[in-house]
Image: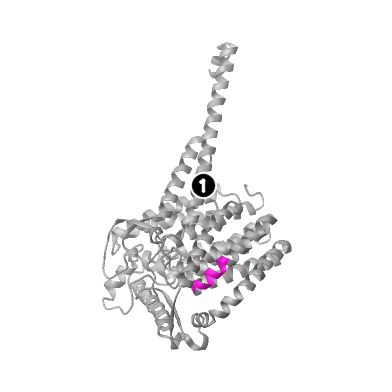
Amino acid sequence: MLQEDLEALPKSELIRQIEELNFRQNSSQSTGACLRTLAKILFAGLIVSIPFRYRTVLLEIYIPPIYRDYTDVLFFTSDLFLLATLAVWAGSFLSDRRKLKFGPVFLTVPILLLPLIGLLSTPLSVAGNISLYNTIRLILLVGLYFYVLNEIRSLNELVIPVGIQVFIQSTIAIGQVLRQTSIGLRFLGELDLNPEMSGISVVYADGVRSLRAYGLSDHPNILGGSLALGLLFLMIVYPRLVSSWKLVFTGLFALGSLALLLTFSRSAWLAFAFGAALLIFLQVKNHLRQPLTHQLSLLLSTAVVLVPFIWYYAPLVGTRLNYRGSFNQIPQEQQAIGERTLLIQSANEIFARHPFTGVGLAAFPVALMQARPQFPVDYQPAHFVLLEVAAETGIFGGLVYFFLMVAPWLVLWLNRRKIVFSIPLIGVTSLLLAVTVIGFFDYYTWLLAPGRLWQWLIWGLWGAIYTVSLPGGEP
């Protein structure tokens, strides 16, 4: 019938309608392309803002004496960029009707299950409003995962925003440690820092309390994790930079490395060390000697810059590394180690009491306060992500997260003979190891906004690059 109608039209009218159809199609594609470009700009802003603590309190859920960031409904600078990125990206899909990539099933399915598990934990949660709020956050993070999976084609696309993030945070962090106080950026969310104040994170040596670097983040460990992942990312892409940019990024890498040192974050140091070691090992194993040469040169030049600072801060570094038994002799280190041990023991007890339902997504501090009204340390999550997930969401949630942790490594091993171990795959796998290491010593990759953004971003990058690394993988 359609063919008969077309044949009945005058030739000029037929041509006009075809041209009008082509125009609409081209206009739709152009709109979609513009929206995708805008989404990438907003996504760059998201990456820059990941460590920023600047926030607005949307709803106060104050449960003293629990730290309010564990209970209040907060809206961070990064949330603004995340929501804008996802909204504009959704608009681009409506414009050009592209097909959504699902990614590796073994990665995407458990990621989709996480917010569902959070939602199911809400009715039985000891703090249902907190669990519901965090479930909404997990839904948005699933959106971030799919955005990265579908839109980021190369790690090189993230070089500039990651570099800006490292530069901003490092410059401020170094200034804070040199001055031993905040540097007057309260309007950007900088905390009021004084090493003599209770609650401010310091490192202690030779009778002196020394301020740890915060940058514009909430805690030195959060800043350290962001710097470790950012520096590892820069190390991965460094060999592909044009010569004129290599000198700039060498200076940036040295600056970020100094800031990482001054966070005195053991988990961040370990994350970078393990990630860099895996990066080097896999490149040697796969005979990728040219990028390795550039990376080793970068590390060597940075080490030369850092040596005087490591020498100067050696007593403080030694304190954090248990030199001369500092964990047993210095009260602050005793407290830090003892606190983590006590929290892990308490998480085990709470999980044993609620093995199937958990206490509710992100509700562990409330459950801990109810279980231990006379607790000797601050109410906070256990510093081990897998245990924290299990305590909050029950054994099923713990198993899903455990599967997410091990599945990529198992799949890489099983498919090692047919996977193309390219520099991007090796690089993003080293990032995956680094963020996983953080989760063994701290909880913020599961609970707090900066850590969550890094975790879901890296999952998305890994899924996208793994897919194209398989034989016949779709680019």
Pinpoint residue 189: horizontal percent, then vertical percent: 39, 60
What x and y, as percent, mark residue 8?
56, 11
Is 74 left, or right, of 222 in this rendering?
left
> What kind of element bears circle 1?
helix
Question: Which secondary structure class fits the magenta region best?
Answer: helix
Task: State left or right for residue 282 relative to residue 5.
Answer: right
On the image, which quarter does residue 347 sit in?
A: bottom left
**Relative height, residue 63 to residue 40 (above, below):** below
Is residue 258 within the magenta segment? yes
Taking the spot 58% from the left edge, 64% from the top edge, the residue there is: 232
Task: Answer whether residue 414 is visible to the viewer in this image.
Answer: no
Q: Nearer the viewer, residue 120 or 234?
A: 234
Left of 245 or right of it: where is 23?
Answer: left
Segment colored magenta: 255-264
Q: Nearer the viewer, residue 446 or 389?
A: 446
Q: Position of residue 149 (x, y in %)?
A: 54, 50
Crowd rating for badge 1 (residues with CA inside 10 Å; few <14, some 14–19, many 20+)? some
Tell me if residue 352 can be seen. yes
Q: Which residue occupies 45% across, 53% down?
A: 142
- The image quarter in which residue 356 lies: bottom left
Quickly name the residue at label 1: 41
Q: Is residue 222 magenta?
A: no
Residue at (43, 56) in percent of width and height: 113
207 sits to left or right of 421: left
What amino acid is labelled 1 in the image? Ile
